[in-house]
Structure formats: structure tokens, C-alpha cells
Amino acid sequence: MVLTALRERGAMSRAELARYVRVSPSTISAVVQDLVADGLIVGTGGPAAGPPRTGRPGLRLTLNPGAGAVAGVEFGFRKLRVELCDLAHSMIGSADSGLPEDHASAAGLAAARRLLDQALAAAGLPHSALIGAGVSLPGPVSQHPDLIKPSAILPGWRGVTGRDIEAALGVPVSIDNDSNLAALGEHVWGAGQGCTDCVTIRFHNGIGCGLFVNGTLVRGATGGAGEIGHITVDERGPLCRCGKRGCLDSYAAIPAILDALAPQYGPLTVTALLDLLAARDPGAVRVVSDAADLVGRAVATACNLLAPQRVIVLGPMAEAGEVVLGPIRAALARHIAPNEPPEVVLGALGARHTALGAIALALGETDWLPAPAAAS
């Protein structure tokens, strides 16, 4: 139980371990002493969080970082990212590259294996050091068995299974969609730390949502929880890539924003849009504010159902700051009752939230535990 807690949660003090594992401090001290003697865990040398304590129990403990590593692999719409983490939860390497938007699964997996090997080599680690990998995909995923569902978002990945990805990467994998893993990354390492009930919004090419309820990531019976981008705004509205009409994505996601601005501004990139927003261009601010208001209304529905403590906003449009957060807050204030609206904050992990969430997924789902070295 101690080894599992340190694998999933990272550095903890003896006191934190005793509370988490629900055993007495004296039992934890005895277990820790044995594990340190076996070389399975080490002290970080830094003080634990919380009030000062006497003696060594306040030092933080981690798994031996030399015992292995975990990878997070993020497949985006046009970008691939790999992050490496040791078992002490320290980031030890990364690599990224572009991807064709409509790439086939075989090409994407081959590129991921090249990046993974590149990151391992830069960190001075053999492939055998990996104990697992989490894989993020920008489309619907079912779990147990792991399977990528048919969708217009990932047409080249139809029918790909977790076993197919394991064979390509050469390591046990866990898979999930990008919105869930962005929420998990922020929950473990970012703006969601210490928050048991949280709604995380990914304001991107689609409007994604990850839900934490009572400290647990909610996936639903089919793995499709959080599809807030497909809430209907107008059933007679434009056709969505999901096959319905008038989805939130069709009005508020980045492609819809760029399309709305095109008649006046011509073709825009996301970078150019953010520049217009930074300059407070009236037309750009109006279109983005309207989109953020629609997102806020949809989030308010989730908040009325779940009563979260916090709403975290991620993705490229989050970089616009209050131009996006302000309308979302205003919509929550108008549409949430009788509960108080939750706080609305930006994510804390930059563009790495999803890859870090993939690492957290792998650390939580693997059953790997270190073994003591054989006696000589």
C-alpha cells in the first residue's frame, strides 16, 4: 500500500502516508525503514508540507527515481507530444513533432515510437526502463477493453485497440480522451490540486470537459462523460461533425470563431486571433465573448447538476484571459441557482496538461511495483 501510494501520488511524508494508508505512525515508520533499507524508496531531503514536526518523519519520501520511468503520449489534431517522468514524479524528458491532421493510425503510432525513443535516449534511459505509458487521443475512447470509437475526429484510427498501441510503443499502455486527461493533469499537478469536485473545460478545436466528483474522474458507463461540446444550442443550427445540428462546438469552438471573423478579417490563425484579442480589437472581442458566453451557459448546466468547487479553463482560447473568463463567470452567475457559482480559474500547466494527465493515468492504472534487489 505504501509503494502504491508513492507511485500514484508522488512525494509524501511519513505522517501523510499514515493518514492515507490508514495505519499507525509507528507501523509506517517500520515499513518505511524496511523499504529504505531495500533501496525501494528514498528521502528527498526537503521538508514536508504542513506544520513543522520534530525528527526525521517530516522528510518527504518517494519511490527510488532510478527504478523506472513513465511516458505520457499526447496525440493532438496536428501535434504529437511525449513527456517522461521518473517514479519520484520528476519530469526527465520531452519531445514533440507535427502531425498531418488526417493521419492514419499506423503513421501516428510510428511517429510516437520515434519520439518516445528520442526522449528516452536524451534522458540516458533504455526502453526497458519504461513501466508504462498513458496515451491521450482527441476523440471518443471506451475503456476495458480499451478501444478508439468510430468518429469523424479520428477517421484513421477506427477500430484501433489498446493492444495495438501497446504493440507499437513496446510498453503497457492506458488510453483516454484528451479532455479527461487534461482534467487529470490539472487535478494531480495543476490548478485542480486539493479540489475534490471540479469541472475542467478545454476550449480548443472542440469544447471538451473533464469532470471530477468526490475526487474521482467521471467517465460514465460508455466512457463518453463530459461531451459538453455536443449539447444542443439550436436544433436547427449548422451541422456538426457528430451528425447532429446546432451543437455548442458549431458555435463556440475555435473553427466556428475563425469562421465568424473571416468575412471581416479574412483567414486567421489562432495566433493572429490572440493578437487581436490582446489589442482589444472590438470585433474579435465581441465574437470570442459571445462564444465564451455560450460555453458558460453549458458549464452552468453541469454546475447545477454537480455543484463543483472550481471551474478550470484550458486550451488556446484560455490564453485570452479575462476576455474568455469574464463571460464564463457572468454566465455562471446568471444561470446557477440556488448554489453559489464556483470560482473560475485558468489552468496552471500550460500546454503540457494533457501529456501530464497521461502520465498520471499510467501511474494510477499500472499494477507495477518495485522489487528489492536480489541478495548477493
Image: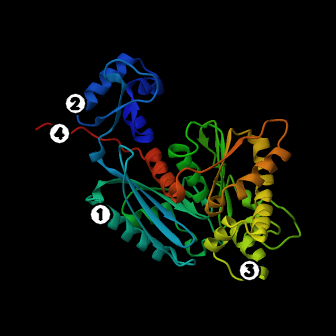
Visible residue check, residue 65: yes
For marks 3 and 2 on the same chain, the one whose residue lies earlier in the sequence = 2
Residue 184 in the image, given as x and y percentages of width and height: 55, 48
Viewer-nearest of discs 2 and 4: 2
Query: Dividing the image into 4 quarters, which one contains the N terminus?
Result: top left
- Of residue 215 and residue 51, the one placed in the foreground of this image is 51
Viewer-nearest of discs 4 and 1: 1
Q: Is mark 1 on a helix, strand or loop?
A: helix
Residue 122 is marked as 1
For marks 2 and 4 on the same chain, the one whose residue lies earlier in the sequence = 2
Quadrant of residue 41 in the image? top left
- How many numbered marks appear? 4
Residue occupying the far left of the picture? 376
Visible residue check, residue 151: no
Left or right: residue 174 versus residue 289 is left
How far is disc 3 from disc 4 in space, using C-alphas? Answer: 68 Å
Q: Please give the name of the residue rendered at 66% of the width and 65% of the height, measured from the top-left corner.
A: 278
- Which residue is tagged 2? 37
